[in-house]
Amino acid sequence: MAGQSGSQLSLFTPDEVEFVAEDELVEIVPNLRMDSLNFICGDYGPFYPQIAIQVPLWLALALKKRGKCTIRPPQWMSIENLTQVLEGERESHAFQTLPFHYVEISRLLFDRARDDIPDVYMVRSLVEDIRDVRFHKVETNLENFTASAVTWKNMAAMEVNIIRAFSGRALQAFYRHENEQAVPDLDRTQDRQPQNLNDRPRRNLRPR
């Protein structure tokens, strides 16, 4: 995965951010009985028909693809909640509270489990509107970026990824600038200081 290389901060690709988001837990409803599944990251199951259970998103999508479950959309993806979030985003400069991976989770569910989402077109429209409003806030914040105003709360993974490289370089520049002002230039300071007459080399004024 992309990371830091030398002094430069590189961006994660959308696919890499999405890969991390697939570890988020979601609720599924199996349609068959199945023993526990054992993975390096943990054990999940056993699974019983029509009994909801939480699993990582990647496992839910894999079982969904094989027709072994349905996926229950997270509560935050309800039309009522998304409508309130959108109104709050439009009325306030602050970011409303949403899951850190709301962009990636919703996109994966829209692409691979849309038949499990009630009113999927309305839900998708609300999520896209929220995303657009929040991305506009990110752009506005970058225009007003200062070292003393880094207080952006409730930002999501994709939004953080947008500003990662810029904010990192900007903070480094602020830090270097402040240090240069804090440490005086010794050569210039010494040039400005008056010399002590007693420190000057004395000439021999006696007549030869």
Image (spheres, helix red, strand yellow):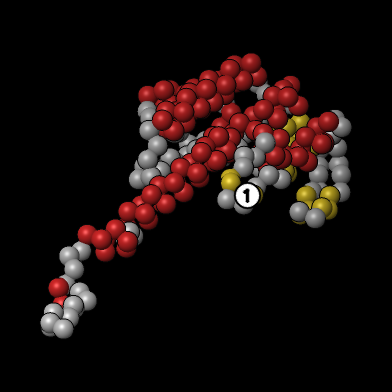
Q: Is residue 22 visible?
A: no
Give the image location of residue 204, x and y in percent: 17, 81
How crowded pointer 1 is (Cα within 10 Å; few <14, some 14-19, many 20+) is rated as few
Please give the name of the residue rendered at 55% of the width and 40% of the height, measured from the top-left corner. Answer: 165
Please give the name of the residue rendered at 82% of the width and 53% of the height, measured from the top-left corner. Answer: 39
* Residue linked to disc 1: 4
**Does 192 sit left or right of 3 as displayed?**
left
Give the image location of residue 95, x and y in percent: 44, 33
Helix, strand or loop status at disc 1: strand
Front residue (pair 141, 102)? 141
Please give the name of the residue rendered at 65% of the width and 40% of the height, measured from the top-left corner. Answer: 12
Please give the name of the residue rendered at 57% of the width and 24% of the height, measured from the top-left corner. Answer: 127
Question: For residue 15, which quarter of the picture?
Answer: top right
Question: For residue 89, which quarter of the picture?
Answer: top left
Front residue (pair 109, 34)? 109
Q: Quadrant of the C terminus?
A: bottom left
Q: Is residue 199 above or below residue 102?
A: below
Give the image location of residue 106, x and y in percent: 64, 29
Q: Quadrant of the N terminus?
A: top right
**Does 205 sit left or right of 48 as displayed?**
left
**Does 47 sit left or right of 197 as displayed?**
right
Q: Is residue 147 visible?
A: yes
Kind of residue indicated by mark 1: Gln
**Does 68 sit left or right of 195 as displayed?**
right
Give the image location of residue 20, x and y in percent: 68, 43
